[in-house]
Image (cartoon, grey):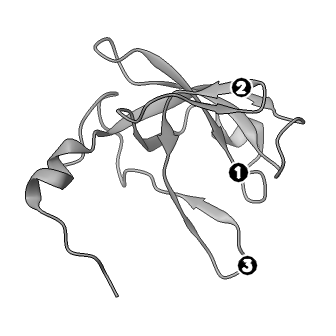
Amino acid sequence: MTKTIEWSDFEAVELRVGTVTEVRDFPEARNPAYKIWVDFGPDIGTRKSSAQVTALYSKEELIGRQVIAVVNFPSKQIGPFRSQCLITGFVNTEGAVVLAVPERSVENGAKLA
């Protein structure tokens, strides 16, 4: 069953678009993951995240790709790495994460409306 939330709950979540600028392996992660740096434009800047997207995306494929991320969660320590945003995606039938991305290019930092 889906939990109903108030409009103000949705407005509090900062879902923003950014462009992936750097991707590194994350061998210390429990599950296969990358360390990813995302540019959210001049107001937010670059944030880093750990993302379990290795099954469907190579590091090279991710560079330059726009992603949608939550930028107002508190930082989270993931092993030796501090994640500063949450890159969003959907789990497919095989259990792999498919990134949530804008259908067309938009300005980095644009908020999901």
Q: Secondary structure at mark 2?
A: strand
Instruction: Please state which of the two labelled residues, at mark 2 or mark 3, is closer to the viewer.
Output: 2
- Residue at 35% x, 33% y: name it: 72
Q: Is residue 13 left or right of residue 69?
A: left
Residue type marked 1: Gln
- Closer to the N terminus: mark 2 or mark 3? 2
Give the Cα distance between marks 3 and 1: 14 Å
Asked whether the residues under the numbered discs 1 and 2 touch, taking CB atoms below 8 Å apart as contact, a structural biologist would say: no
Residue at the spot of label 2: 81
Q: Is residue 27 left or right of residue 94?
A: right
Asked whether the residues under the numbered discs 3 and 1 touch, taking CB atoms below 8 Å apart as contact, a structural biologist would say: no
Q: Secondary structure at mark 1?
A: loop
Percent position of residue 19, x then y: 48, 30
Question: Extreme left residue here?
Answer: 7
Q: Which mark is residue 52?
A: 1
Residue type marked 3: Glu
Percent position of residue 96, x then y: 70, 67
Tell me the crowding category of disc 2: few under 14, some 14 to 19, or many 20 or more residues within 10 angstroms, Cα based: some
